Image (cartoon, grey):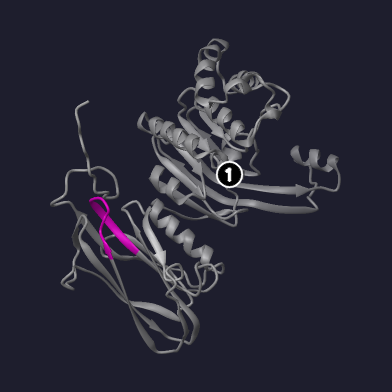
């Protein structure tokens, strides 16, 4: 049995001629709204126990509305949500906090609403106070808190006891780097213990690092449900191509899904990774000097051509990336039917594993202005460690260790 089932879910905001008409409509009287705006339509998905699902989409896509309906703070217009387990949620910053009450008093109130007994609340308050690390402000009114302090207390109380389902909206993005690391460590601990996670974030690394599945919302409906890497690549493409007309998705022989987009004035003809002898290679030793060769054909005259590239790990997280705008090597007044070769030389100072290369052909430092071609999974290669000391992590940093007896 699934932990959560969402079926035919929809939410509309309606205006009526009068409040009496609104109330009457609740009881089935035939009062029609004067205005109707659908925020979500035809939403359906299942969540299994232990899954971690990222929900992504542009502002206004309906992400926060969906989470509010799942947590019960907003009533759906149509459809059903069946949940089997206790939910802990961190939605809008400070949601439910009374600014005149102290942090401690708000914790007691919020924990009670979450179903904690008085005995449980008293047991967890010291842990909440320690985790939040707001010092003496814990007994000061919340109106004196910064946004980061509010988030600390809200997260600490929501995760005081491990829930079956943890829901996190963008609230974590306001915290400082230290507390973000601390929060994500707790989320990972919960995941290891079987907690199901629903997280809304624009942070690609967070979605791909925490989740094993992602949902992409666009204009109030789910347009993609798949692996985080595949969904984030598609999301990136539709941001660049707001009309979605040039976004293409195809399955490669490896089974991975490749997303490409662009207007087509320039395209990558070939891409290859070579060793120092100029031989194409698929396996690279840690620290080995390599050349990434990218041949580009220009099909129409363009004022400027910039090549960008990113190296991603197997989860799709960016290990390294830059472009010729930043290296001050742009090509100006590029003529039609010309070809250009880019040789990018660098030592492969990354950890063992499988990696892919994404390329971008644009006119400036970003693909949001003129996106001639964006190509994910343009090349896949593997890094092995055959002659370096054993090390952990995704980068090779040559150590020099000196030891002396004191």
Q: On the rendered structure, is 145 left or right of 24?
A: left
Residue 3 appears in the rendering: no
Q: Magenta span has 356?
A: yes
**Is residue 268 or residue 276 the one in the foreground?**
276
Rendering coords of residue 379 (x, y %): 29, 66
Q: Is 153 rendered above or below residue 248? A: above
Q: Secondary structure at mark 1?
A: helix
Question: Which stretch did the figure color magenta?
Answer: 346-357
Residue 118 placement: quadrant? top right
Please tell me whether residue 376 is drawn above or below residue 121 in the rendered image. below
Query: Would residue 139 be found to the left or right of residue 24 on screen?
Result: left
Residue that extends furthest to the front in the rendered view of this protein: 406
Q: Position of residue 4 (x, y in %)?
A: 47, 37
Please indicate, yes or no, whether residue 68 appears anywhere in the rendered image: yes
Number of numbered discs: 1
**Which residue lies at the image location 51% right of the left edge and 64% below the top edge?**
238
Report the front residue among 198 and 383: 383
The N terminus: image quadrant? top left
Mark 1 sits on what residue?
A: 66
Q: Residues within 10 Å of mark 1 (few under 14, many from 20)?
A: many
Q: Is residue 347 left or right of residue 153?
A: left
Residue 137, quarter of picture: top right
Horizontal and vertical percent position of residue 165 = 47, 32
Report if residue 235 lies within the magenta region.
no
Please identify the residue farthest to the top as the structure is shown: 119
- Residue 124 on image: x %, y %: 51, 16
287 to the left or right of 168: left
* Quadrant of the drawing holding the C terminus: top left
Q: Residue at left 44%, top 43%?
A: 53
Q: Is residue 66 above or below residue 119?
A: below
């Amino acid at each position: 049995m699934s932990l959560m089932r969402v079926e035919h879910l929809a939410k509309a905001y309606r205006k009526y001629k009068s409040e009496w008409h609104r109330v009457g409509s609740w009881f089935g009287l035939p009062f029609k709204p004067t205005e109707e705006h659908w925020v979500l339509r035809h939403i359906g998905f299942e969540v299994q126990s232990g899954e971690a699902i990222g929900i992504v989409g542009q502002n206004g896509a309906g992400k926060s509305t969906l989470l509010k309906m799942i947590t019960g703070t907003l009533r759906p217009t149509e459809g059903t949500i069946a949940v089997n387990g206790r939910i802990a949620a961190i939605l809008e910053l400070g949601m439910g906090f009374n600014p005149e009450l102290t942090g401690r008093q708000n914790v007691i109130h919020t924990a009670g609403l979450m179903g904690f007994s008085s005995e449980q609340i008293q047991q967890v308050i010291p842990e909440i106070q320690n985790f939040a690390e707001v010092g003496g402000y814990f007994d000061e009114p919340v109106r004196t808190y910064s946004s980061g302090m509010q988030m600390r207390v809200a997260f600490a109380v929501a995760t005081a006891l491990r829930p079956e389902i943890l829901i996190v909206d963008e609230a974590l993005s306001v915290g400082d780097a230290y507390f973000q690391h601390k929060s994500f460590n707790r989320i990972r601990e919960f995941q290891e213990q079987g907690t199901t996670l629903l997280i809304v974030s624009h942070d690609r690394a967070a979605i791909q690092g925490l989740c094993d599945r992602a949902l992409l919302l666009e204009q109030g409906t789910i347009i993609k449900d798949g692996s985080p890497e595949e969904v984030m690549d598609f999301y990136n493409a539709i941001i660049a191509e707001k009309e979605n007309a040039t976004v293409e998705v195809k399955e490669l022989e490896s089974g991975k899904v490749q997303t490409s987009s662009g207007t087509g004035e320039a395209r990558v003809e070939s891409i290859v990774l070579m060793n120092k002898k100029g031989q194409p290679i698929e396996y690279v030793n840690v620290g080995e000097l390599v050349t990434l060769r990218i041949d580009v054909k220009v099909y129409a005259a363009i004022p400027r051509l910039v090549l960008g590239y990113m190296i991603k790990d197997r989860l799709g997280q960016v290990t390294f990336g830059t472009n010729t705008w930043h290296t001050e090597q742009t090509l100006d007044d590029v003529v039609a039917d010309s070809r250009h070769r880019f040789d990018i030389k660098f030592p492969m100072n990354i950890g063992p594993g499988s990696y892919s290369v994404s390329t971008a052909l644009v006119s400036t430092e970003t693909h949001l202005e003129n996106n001639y071609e964006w190509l994910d999974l343009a090349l896949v290669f593997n890094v092995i460690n055959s002659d370096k000391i054993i090390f952990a992590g995704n980068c090779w940093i040559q150590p020099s260790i000196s030891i002396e007896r004191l």
